[in-house]
Image (cartoon, rainbow, N blue to C red):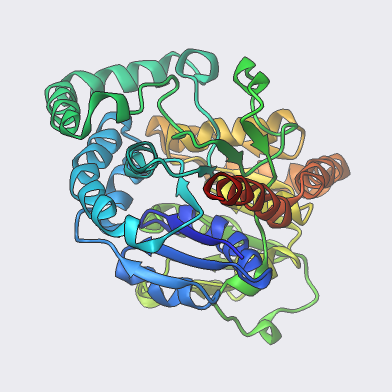
Amino acid sequence: MAKIVVLSIPAYGHINPVLPIIAELIRRGHEVVVYNEPIFEELIRATGAGFVAYPPAMRLQDLARVLADGNLIATLNLFLTATGPLLDFCLTRLPAEHLDVLVFDGTCLWGQMAAKRLGFKSVSTSPFFVFELMRHLTGRAELWGHARNFLPGLPRLVWNIIRLMRFGPRNYPLQWPAFPMRGDVTLLLTSAELHPKSPLFEDPSFVFVGPAIDPKTRLDEFDFTQLNDRPLVYISLGTLHFSNDRFFELCMETFATYPAQFLLSAGRGSDIGRFRSVPSNFIIADAVPQLAVLERASLFITHGGLNSLHESLWFGVPMVIVPQQFEQLRNAVTAERGGAAIVLDDECYRRPITGAALSAAVAAVIGTPSFRDAARALGKSLHDAGGFQEAANQIEAIASRSAARLH
């Protein structure tokens, strides 16, 4: 059996999609060790994997801050700054693992650089769409936003790149687009039908395997006896934007008399008593088992994070999507073009969304069967791509090549 090391990053939106893959590899008898921030140790060990803590170079709070803002240059600078100490750590630690294949998140510069430097066979996992700037822009406002942020961050970006040259220029991942980092195989955790089209995918090293979804890898709990026989509308802004209480209050005000039951996920570990008044048709929880909730839902009001979008489509649930930043808007547009969602983009442009617009979108999606039909069709494309089983197959194939080479 193979020894597999997984390098992840401290973000639920990146670790949750690979947990089912890790669990499947362990079920098949492989040894898996995951490197991440200590806050994720319990979640990772629940799969049966070993765990190694990174040195304190990148924290969940730091990553959440830059990802929530959607500032590409700040995000890139955070990863470049963290890469030096994390790569030093990996170059020291990984040779002793005697691994067959190195698996790394598509944002792990240190993963691709370590694989090159140490000569490991590697697999990259991309839980986000490949973004080609000029091909996939949602409009001039997004281009202006990126340009406005770019110049102030440019000196630091150049300095961070220069500092990493000490690891050898040949090991630096010079590629376009910059993300995802590439392995011998790069696994795209979505379907070709959903992903925006690109000539990049003529390269056979890009493989669509669909999202890795398995409720058994989620630890959140919820008392489902609280639900009644009314249609269930689930509301969540994910793990980064749950502080947008203005939006949550708007939902409660708008739908206080709506003939449905609303379940609002207010943010992991947050104070659910912070809301002034909660209508009788609303249930507030800090975190819920999202997969189990979506299995019962009629509609999902979401920020459009790709994991949330995948999970909603997986269960054929149509959406009203209220993106909080431009990456989420790009995700949302794919679902809208596929007929499975209505997108309200006001929050992206810092405009106050209105209750009237939100109410009209919810009524349209719930009242039009074609939205659910389209969600089910896109969901079928995700199921057909293979999921965590196919991802495990791909990793096993690379591990067997590594073993054959060593033999």
Residue 293, x across and y down, in percent: 67, 68
| Picture quadrant of residue 27 | bottom right
Q: Residue at x 48, y 33 (%)?
A: 182
Q: Residue 312, position in %: x, y?
A: 69, 53
Observer-nearest of 32 and 217: 32
The one of 101 and 82 positioned closer to us in this rendering: 101
- In the rendered image, the residue lying farthest to the front is 407
Which x, y percent locates residue 286?
46, 73
> Is residue 109 found left or right of 339 in the rendered image?
left
- Relative depth, front residue between 253 and 82: 82
**Image quadrant occupied by the N terminus:** bottom right
- Residue at figure coordinates x 66%, y 70% from the top left: 215
- Residue 103: x and y, percent? 49, 50
Residue 281 shows up from this direction: no
Against 329, residue 312 (above or below) is below
Relative vertical location of residue 377 with respect to residue 11 in this rendering, above or below: above
Please report the residue visible at 24 percent of the width from the left and 43 percent of the height from the top: 83
Q: How many marks?
A: 0
